[in-house]
Image (cartoon, rainbow, N blue to C red):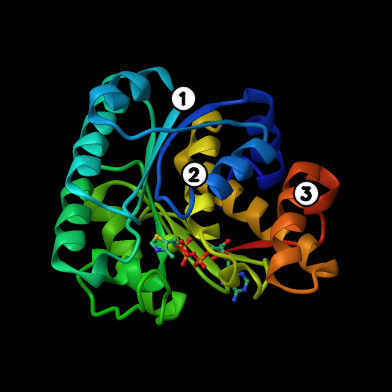
Amino acid sequence: MVTTSPADAFAATRAATPLVHCITNYVAMNVAANTLLAAGASPAMLHAAEEAGEFAAMADALTINIGTLSPSWVEGMVAAIDGAQRAGRPWVLDPVALQASAYRRDAAMRLMDLSPTILRGNASEILAVAGDSGAGRGADTTDSVAAAESGARRLAVERHCVVAVTGAVDFVTDGSRAVRITGGSTLMPRVTALGCALSCLVGAFAAAVPDPFDATVGALASFATAGEIAAEKAEGPGSFGWRFLDALAALDAAAFHGRTRVTPA
Ligand SMILES: Nc1ncnc2c1ncn2[C@@H]1O[C@H](COP(=O)(O)OP(=O)(O)O)[C@@H](O)[C@H]1O
Ligand SMILES: Cc1ncsc1CCOP(=O)(O)O
Ligand SMILES: [Mg+2]
């Protein structure tokens, strides 16, 4: 189980105001930046290879997302990872839709070989990284989190990283510890790029919470809690989107009580 509770991890992240370097996709940039701001972090979205390494070394964490990939972006990603690793910073990989094309899969596996601190994806994506047969439909999952759990455990051991599989019930493991996180809302997958925004938030937590497992669980539990609060009054995906940002910005220790549950897996 976790040694830092999600409420404490959230408070630590807000207090640390981490600068998070995000190389994310065109769809996600705005919602991910707003998500980080709502949690008290500072987002920076930049991907040019000419500056990415220098910037990543200065930031508190790096997040990499392959959602709208092209060769020049991959160069920027590799430069940023090098900068982050030289500076001893954690980095998060979100392998969006890697199963959709050979180009995307090769890029994702090349990035996996650079040893992410944390891997976060939906079930179809984690199955594909693990080499199991996951389907997926573009950026959306067609597999259950349960189907990806054993692959996630294997990946965590082989790659020495924390693996988070998200969905109706999230699963997080570092190979020896594993938990499930309930909560959130069925409206979350109906708002684009919330998963991408979550990966950026995981980076913020990893900057502030020393244990990457606790950081990942804290970020996912905070997301689930804010999602649950937002859904209470949301009339659909549109109002859920802004209510979710407001709920994240207003999150405090009391909000965690009785809502999201983290259980051993
Ligand atoms: N059916 C659901 N019920 C509750 N929360 C969900 C559901 N599906 C996804 N989520 C939440 O939405 C967020 C994004 O996860 P997910 O949709 O799996 O990622 P992605 O957008 O990368 O496919 C996570 O916080 C996850 O827990
Ligand atoms: C729709 C889409 N197309 C390319 S990236 C992207 C966003 C995917 O976001 P998420 O993985 O959070 O659903
Ligand atoms: Mg995604």
Q: Is mark 2 within 8 Å of ligand 2?
A: no
Classify residue 45 as left or right of residue 102: right
Looking at the rendered image, the disc whose residue lies closer to the viewer, 2 or 3, is: 3
Q: Earlier in the sequence, mark 1 or mark 3?
A: 1
Classify residue 85 as left or right of residue 209: left
Q: Residue at x 81, y 61 (%)?
A: 258
Q: Is mark 3 within 8 Å of ligand 1?
A: no
In space, the residues marked 2 and 3 are separated at their CA atoms by: 17 Å
Label 3 Cα crowd, 10 Å radius (few <14 / some 14-19 / many 20+)? some
Contact between labelled residues 2 and 1, with CB atoms less than 8 Å apart: no
In space, the residues marked 1 and 2 are separated at their CA atoms by: 12 Å
Q: Which residue is mark 1?
A: 60
Quadrant of picture, ligand 1? bottom right
Numbered badge on residue 246: 3
Q: Earlier in the sequence, mark 1 or mark 2?
A: 1
Q: Residue at x 56, y 26 (%)?
A: 18
Label 1 Cα crowd, 10 Å radius (few <14 / some 14-19 / many 20+)? many
Contact between labelled residues 3 and 2, with CB atoms less than 8 Å apart: no
The amino acid beneath tag 3 is Asp
Numbered badge on residue 200: 2
Label 2 Cα crowd, 10 Å radius (few <14 / some 14-19 / many 20+)? many
The amino acid beneath tag 2 is Cys
Quarter where residue 155 is shown: bottom left
